[in-house]
Structures are given as C-alpha cells and as structure tokens.
Image (cartoon, rainbow, N blue to C red):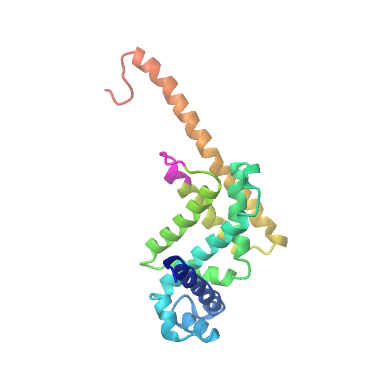
Amino acid sequence: MTLESNQRDRQALRDRLLQATLPHVIFDGWGMTALEAGARDLDLEIGHAHAVFASPAKDLASHFSDWADRRMLLRLSALDLPAMKVRERITMAVRVRLQELAGHQEAVRRLAGFLILPGNASLAARNGYRSVDAIWRVAGDNAVDFNFYTKRALLGAVLVSTTLHWLDDNSPDQSETWAFLDRRIAGVMEIPKLQARAKDFAAKLSKPLRDLGMGGFNRA
C-alpha cells in the first residue's frame, strides 16, 4: 500500500468519524466525550479514535473546517466557474460552503463558542485562513501582491459574519442570508477600486508638490 493510499484511507476514516461525532457535539461539545460516542456508533475502538484525533477538541474542530472546505470545492468543481465573474464565484463559494453545512447548524454554533475560548485564537485563525484562501484560489485569484492578505482578511470577516447570520436565519431557503452575503461581498469587491482611486489621486497630487519643491508630505 502506497503512502498516498494510506493518506486517503486515513482521511476517509477521519471523515467517517467526524460525521459520526457531529450529532454528539450538539450535546457534549467539541471534545473527547463526543468523539468516543461517535467511535462507539461506528463500532470503532476508542483507542483507535484517539490515535486519529490525538487532541480531540482541536483536531476535530480543524478537521470539520477542512471537511467543509473539501465538500465546497467538490461542489464547485461541477460548476462552470470560468463563465462567472470573480464576485459571483466568491459569492457562490461562500453560499455552497454554508449549504454543505446544512443540518449541522448546532455543531457550527458550538464550534463558534469553542473557538472564542482563550487559547483557541490561533486555531480559529488557521481554520479561517485556510477557508478563505481556498475560496480566493478557486475564484481564480493566485496573485501574491500586497493585496493578498488584505483580500483574505476582508473575506474572512464576510465568511464569519455571514455564517453567524445563517445560524439564526429562519427565512425561506435562507433568503435573508444570501441577501446579506451579496451586500457584504459587494463591499469587499469595492476595496480594490477604492485603493486604485487612492493611488491615482496620490500620484496626481505628488507631481504639483514636487513642482513646488515640497518633495512630498513628509518634508517640513
């Protein structure tokens, strides 16, 4: 058996164990109790479950985010993304990710509470960065310019706020969430335009200042 095959088998087991654990997370939270209950549902030895998720709470939370990202990318791979505008691709990606989490709202709610606990900030940041990076890349953005982290930070805020809105949305087909998402994405897509305008304004302003011998704003 090859290393790649071993990795696929391990990931498949982690996925199965995660999905068996999710119903228990609602009552027991993200941690060992829920993990062991999930393992029992699969007739899996408890020791095996601990070997797969050595740090039950954090490892499960991280894998849940990765699982949602992979399901999102799989759904998106069946769509004609090149025919869409970048804004539409990003909106679709966030929407699909939330749709893939349908039925697990309470687990997501418990996860949000877990991630704001002291000591979990780095885990929340890693999970969030991985998700928004996957979204930007599937949307066709592979640039590594100075906007790289700005784009991801802005989209991270959109993903978090939209997820929180989705958790409490009782509207038909979550229509209020999708309208909220559209507004937030519109704001993100305006940023590059605003930055370009600011640069253009600064460039136009700098010439007369140089002509006046001021050499810019930093000169007394």
Q: At which x and y percent is residue 126? A: 41, 59
In front here: 15 or 68?
15
In this rendering, does residue 84 appear at all? no
Left or right side of 194 for 84: right
**Which quadrant does the C terminus fall into?**
top left
Asked if the stretch drawn in magenta spans residue 181, the answer is no
Residue farthest to the top? 211
Image coordinates for residue 38, horizontal then vertical, percent: 52, 81
Q: Residue at x 45, y 49 (%)?
A: 153
* Observer-nearest of 206 and 30: 30
Residue 196 vs 125, above or below: the answer is above
| Residue appearing at x 53%, y 55% in the figure | 159
Q: Answer with left or right where residue 39 lies relative to residue 79.
A: left
Point out the residue furthest to the right here.
172
**Quarter occupied by the N terminus:** bottom left
Range of magenta residues: 143-151
Q: Is residue 119 visible?
A: yes
Q: Is residue 50 above or below residue 135?
A: below
Q: Residue at x 59, y 70 (%)?
A: 104
Looking at the picture, how far across and down is residue 70, in whole percent? Answer: 54, 61
The residue shown at (58%, 54%) is 94
Q: Position of residue 155 (x, y in %)?
A: 51, 49
Q: How many discs appear?
A: 0
Q: Is residue 43 above or below residue 69?
A: below
Return the residue found at the far front. Answer: 1
